[in-house]
Image (cartoon, rainbow, N blue to C red):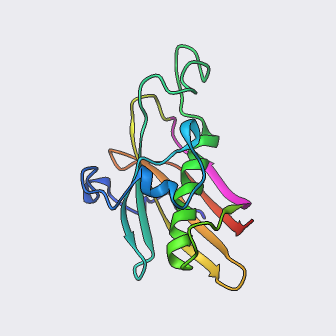
Amino acid sequence: MTSSVPFIDPKDFPLDKVFMTAEDCMLRNPQRFEFLQLDSILHLDLPGNLVVGSRLLQPGEFWERGHLPGRPLFPGVLQIECMAQIASIHAHHELELDLGVFMGFGALEGVRFRQPVGAGEKLWVAGKIRKSSKRRPYFKWEGQVIREDGTMVSQATITGVSL
């Protein structure tokens, strides 16, 4: 993945047009409490191969106090977790998986952190499945984290497998 061009323009995916809530996301992903990294799925287009979700960074989140004092930055590992969680939901729909199937990390490639992200920002997470298999549930997903002004802040290709 070499492009620094965002997949979407956040203006095309308003935060009040929710397709799946955080509670709906939890039906497919086991992450809870601090590790639920998606607020909603705003758009899921299987024929067009695009999923778009949101992550609103609230004041006082667990990472803010220690990363980094005086200049809180949303950790890159949590940006990757945002992408992994939406990728899992995308794969569940694309591969028509049962709700109880857990998709875990298999690999990360092409990870790039392009801009710092601070507390209080609104983020869009968008991505596309590049390869998948129903036989043994597997996917390779290319994703991005994009801030409200349309700037891409991070990107990665995530491989997921059923565990």
In the image, taking residue 66 as reference, residue 119 lies left or right, namely left
Residue at image x 58%, y 63%?
Answer: 88
Relative vertical location of residue 121 with respect to residue 31 in this rendering, above or below: above
Which quarter of the figure has residue 104? Answer: bottom right
Q: Is residue 109 magenta?
A: yes
Q: Is residue 152 magenta?
A: no
Q: Residue furthest top?
A: 70
Quarter of the image with the C terminus is bottom right
Quarter of the image with the N terminus is bottom right
Residue at image x 39%, y 30%?
Answer: 120
Relative vertical location of residue 4 with respect to residue 149 in this rendering, above or below: below
Which quarter of the figure has residue 158? Answer: bottom right
Which quarter of the figure has residue 9? Answer: bottom left
Residue at image x 61%, y 57%?
Answer: 156
Residue 159 percent coordinates (x, y): 68, 66
Residue 110 percent coordinates (x, y): 66, 58
Tally the marks: 0
Relative vertical location of residue 15 with respect to residue 71 in this rendering, above or below: below
Q: Which residues are magenta?
A: 105-116
> In the image shown, does 120 or 31 lie closer to the viewer?
31
Residue 31 percent coordinates (x, y): 59, 48
Task: Name the chief secondary structure element in magenta.
Answer: strand
